[in-house]
Every structure is written in C-alpha cells, then in structure tokens.
Image: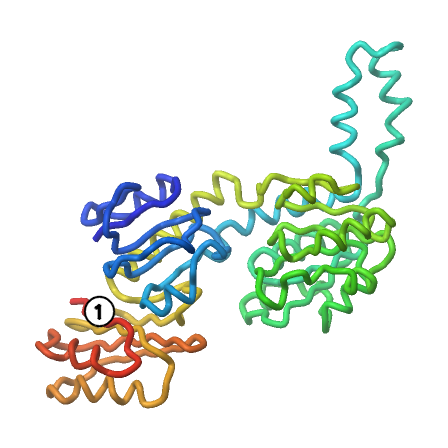
Amino acid sequence: MKIQLLNKIAKIGVDRFDPSFTVGAEVDAPDAIMVRSAAMHDMEFGKELLAIARAGAGVNNIPLDRCAGQGIVVFNTPGANANGVKELCLAALILASRDIVGGVEWAKTLPGVEGGVAKAVEAGKSKFAGREILGKKLGVIGLGAIGGLVANAARSLGMTVMGCDPYITVNAAWSLSRSVEHAASYEDIYKSADYITLHVPSTKDTKGMINRETIAKMKDGVRIINLARADLVDVDAIREALESGKVASYVTDFPTEDTLTLKNTVNIPHLGASTEESEDNCAVMAADELVEFLTTGNVKNSVNYPNVSIPHTGAARICICHLNIANMLSQITSAVSARGINIENLSNGSRGEYAYTIVELGVDVPDGVKEAIEAIDGVIRVRVIA
C-alpha cells in the first residue's frame, strides 16, 4: 500500500511502516495520507484513498464530512502532544502574571546606558512587576488529554483549580486529581476564576465563546490563556476588555494581524506541540493507526467514523463504511448468510449519520458477497481483508 506525506513527518513515525508500504511525499494515488497542517479542503481524493491520519489533535484542515461520505476514515492523535502543550500552558500562566517578555525586551536596550546596566536594572525593574500564581484560582475549560494535565499540574503548583467539561470521558475523569473542583457550567468558572485557560476544539458551539457577554461575567483583572484555537476568542471583545482593564492579560498561541496589536497580550508563535517529543509521539501514533486500519480494518481514534475494533482471528473479514440507518446490519448479515457462510464475529458502531461494521469470517470471502453488500442502499465502501 502507498502512503503519501503532505508535510514533513518525524522519521520515527515513517519508520513504523514496514517495506511492504511505499511512503513518501511524491506518492501518487495513495491508499492513505499522513498530514500535519496542510490544508486539504480543496483537495480531490482518488477512489483508492482509504484513510487520512492527522499527526496532531486538531482536524480543522481536513474536510471530515466529505471524507466520511466517500468512505475515507480520518484519524487524529489525541494525547500524543498533550504534555508539550501542558508545559507551554504552565509557562503561559507565568507570562500572563508577570511582564517577563516586556522586561526581557527592555533589558536588551540597556547596553551602554549611563551609570551601568546593574543600576539601570534596579531603577527600572518595577515597571515589570507582576503577581504570583500561588493561591489563585484557575478555571480550566475542557478536561481532555491536555486540560486534565494542566489542571493537575496547576494544582501541584499551589493553585486552586476548577474545571468544566460537559463531554468528559470516564478515563479523563479518573485521571483528574480529586482536589480539582467540579464546575457545573462555564458560568461558574467565569464568575470566580482569576485565570481561565481554554482546552476545547473549535466547533459551532465553542467559536467565539469568549465574547463581550461572557467577559462581562468574569472577575475584574482576569487573565485568559488560549492555546487551543484562535477563533474561540472574539478579538474585538478581548481588545475592549484589555483596554478597559477588565482583562489584565491575554496569552494566545495563535498570532494574527489583530492580536499582534493588542495591549497586554503575549503572542506565542503556535508552539503548543512544537517539541521534538510531541512531533515524534504524534507521528508514531498516526502511523500505527494507519497500519492497524489498512492491515486489519480496525478503527481507533477516528474523528468521522466510530471506533470499531475486534481481533483478526478468522480467515477473512469484511469492513463496511455505511450510513447509520435502520435494517442495515440485518441486510449485511443476510448477504453473508445467503452464501451459507457462518459469521464468527461482528462489531458495529455509529457516529452521527455514519456507521462502520466489521464482519469476521472463518473462511475466505466467496465471489459475489462483496458485490451483494455494495448493492445495499446506504453502503458507502466495502473492503475485504484476508
């Protein structure tokens, strides 16, 4: 099978493909694509394309719905870069509290100053004084792989931490420190937190979630950190709040023409996951997801199809991407049993309007079975794996 690389992928990840795979940037008609930040919304996908793996968590650069409609399974790598982002968030807490950036830039102007550098430093350092985070309250919005690590680390640094995530998973909940307070709503965080950090994806519900209305509910002098997505924060609203002092400081990992002109703002050049370890972890996870899917049909960490995985112990299996509609499973199983074949194992899952089914057989798939399943109304793609 052929794997196309749309961006530079860490060698440790590329090396996960054995010699049976052809991997490279110039691959034509790929069976799968590995991508980081390349924009794919205007790309045309060939009939051969089975999967796309994003070496990272965000998938805004990939047309998820179009891929699902063509039976292209899209993967991401949740948690692979979480520690790198967590560490940057801890730095952002300090940058939001103390004007370290301004102080460093000021210090660069001191060579040759009258009276000497040491005297100038002592005379001018008060302009950059700040506050400590010890004992302050941090509100964490989103308690997934990154938000949970941030909450636990901030608690260890002596902050009072409260978190809110309406969609928190059981595993994420178990990973949280018991001392992290549960906020029933974002409003609870807005009204009581000294610091607010965002760790949610960009969706129709979260875009612009930090706006004039929500900022008005916050404490005076609140400090906001956004290492998640640029459009979570309304730029005009944050500008007004920074000018008035309602928001004391804003740290973002997504500089724009607008944010670069904001008062009391630290613009980090999208360094959240830019560590050697994060890039390696994301590349390895993305490659492993593709190898597993291409060789067994198992789906793990998909963002547009359900996660469906069973051991490949039979002689062959049939993997089906289809619409999530009534009577689909019975039609699939009937198409198999009509040939006198016993189904040894079956797993199915759904995600919104799409679903995925694996049918495990103890014999090779006879002629006509694949075609019979493909003929079922609502079936998008059928793949046979021996």
In this rendering, the answer to whether 377 lies above or below 91 is below
> In the figure, residue 9 lies in which quadrant?
top left
Q: Position of residue 119 (x, y in %)?
A: 88, 16
Q: Amino acid at mark 1?
A: Arg
Task: Tell me how many marks there are.
Answer: 1
Residue 234 in the image, given as x and y percentages of width and height: 70, 56
Q: Is residue 331 left or right of residue 227?
A: left
Q: Is residue 128 visible?
A: yes
The residue wearing badge 1 is 383
The residue that appears at 16% across and 76% down in the rendered structure is 370
Identify the residue at the far left of this view. 367
Looking at the picture, the colour scheme in use is rainbow
Up-down relation of residue 191 to residue 252 (above or below): below
Q: Rate crowding at label 1 as few (under 14), some (14 to 19) or many (20 or more) other CA atoms within 10 Å.
A: some
| SS at badge 1 | strand
Q: Quarter holding the C terminus?
A: bottom left
Q: Is residue 214 left or right of residue 257?
A: right
* Residue at x 16% of width, y 88% of height: 337
- Percent across and percent down for residue 329 are 29, 85
Who's the residue at 74% across and 52% down the image?
Answer: 236
- x and y percentages locating residue 8 in the rendered image: 39, 40
Q: Does residue 135 show up?
A: no
Give the quarter of the image for residue 219.
Answer: bottom right
